Amino acid sequence: MENNKPKANGALVAALVIMTILAGVSSYLLYEQKEVSKNQEATIATRVEELATTRTRLDSISTALDAKIAEVRKLGGDVTDLERVKVQLEKDKAALRRGQRISIAKYEAKIKQYEAFLAEKDTLIAQLQTENQVLTTNNQVLNDENTTLKTVKQTLEDSVNTISTVNKDLSEKVTRAAALKAQNVRVFALNSRGKQRDATADEVKAKRVDKLKVVYMLPENPLTKQEEKEVYVRVLDPTGAVVSDMANGSGTFQVNGQEQVYTVKQTVPFTNNNQNVELTYTRGGIPYKPGKYTIEFYSEGFRIGEGSFAIK
């Protein structure tokens, strides 16, 4: 029994040593596993932070691109390149969100390219702004010149209108000055036997009036052309009505844009030598009303004279 006791003690010691070694190995392995887990967690955290930073930077570039597109379009520039880069940027953002085999270094390179592109477009925008400022200044100058030209044009038109008005007035004055004048008007009443009485000086009985003979003078006028002139004669009865007979030579003519009835008209070859003119009017058997009659003369649109006679 005493011989077996040392053997049992040795086995126990050996077992304790083995257990101690196993415990140490287990502790070491556990420690190693914890360290690996810590390293993995740190790596993951770093990766997540890098991805978040990259997304933020891409979003910032996207916002800046939108602003550049709007500015260049407002300035009238070409946005084709900007829109093409915008499409590519959205693809890169989508790939980053999917997280498939992401290379942060590759995205860093892309971000630098985008930032360089934005800087290049800043130069383009500055150039467009300068060109637009020049255009704005030129447009203002042109607008000022256009306003000046309009003012000058209006002034010229006003001057032309004034001159036209003056010329028209002068023309009308010259035309009026060149018009005929009927003067020394006398009216004679002729009976059926051809005997005449001066109806201008004395009242003539109506029954003794078969015809009217009108005598007047056309004084000379250096402004009046020597040519045939149409002279319209209007005889107005005591009520103001025109003595007329359309079947016996009466008709209508225009005076100041209005149609008037005339009693008789005649064509007079104007000789510009104070010529005397006479005409005879036959009413066709219709008796004249008692009272004062007025006789008016018109030619070339103007009233050129008048006279009167009386019937009792």
Image: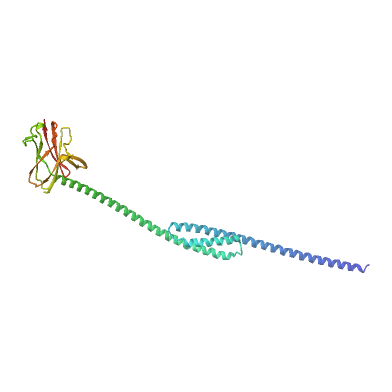
Q: Nearer the viewer, residue 249 or 21?
A: 249
Is residue 212 left or right of 129 when viewed as pictured? Answer: left
Is residue 83 left or right of 273 when viewed as pictured? Answer: right
Q: How is the image coloured?
A: rainbow
Kindly give the residue lying farthest to the right in the view shown: 1
The mark total stands at 0
Is residue 254 left or right of 24 when viewed as pictured? Answer: left
Quadrant where the C terminus sits is top left
Point out residue 208 in the picture as x, y percentages from the top left corner.
9, 33
> Image quarter for residue 38?
bottom right
Q: Nearer the viewer, residue 147 or 223?
A: 223
Q: Compared to 258, does 65 lie above or below?
A: below
Quadrant where the N terminus sits is bottom right
Is residue 14 left or right of 58 when viewed as pictured? Answer: right
- Residue at x 76%, y 66% (from the top left corner): 25
Q: Nearer the viewer, residue 164 or 2?
A: 164
- Residue at x 22%, y 49% (from the top left corner): 164
- Residue at x 55%, y 61% (from the top left corner): 91
- Residue at x 71%, y 63% (from the top left corner): 33
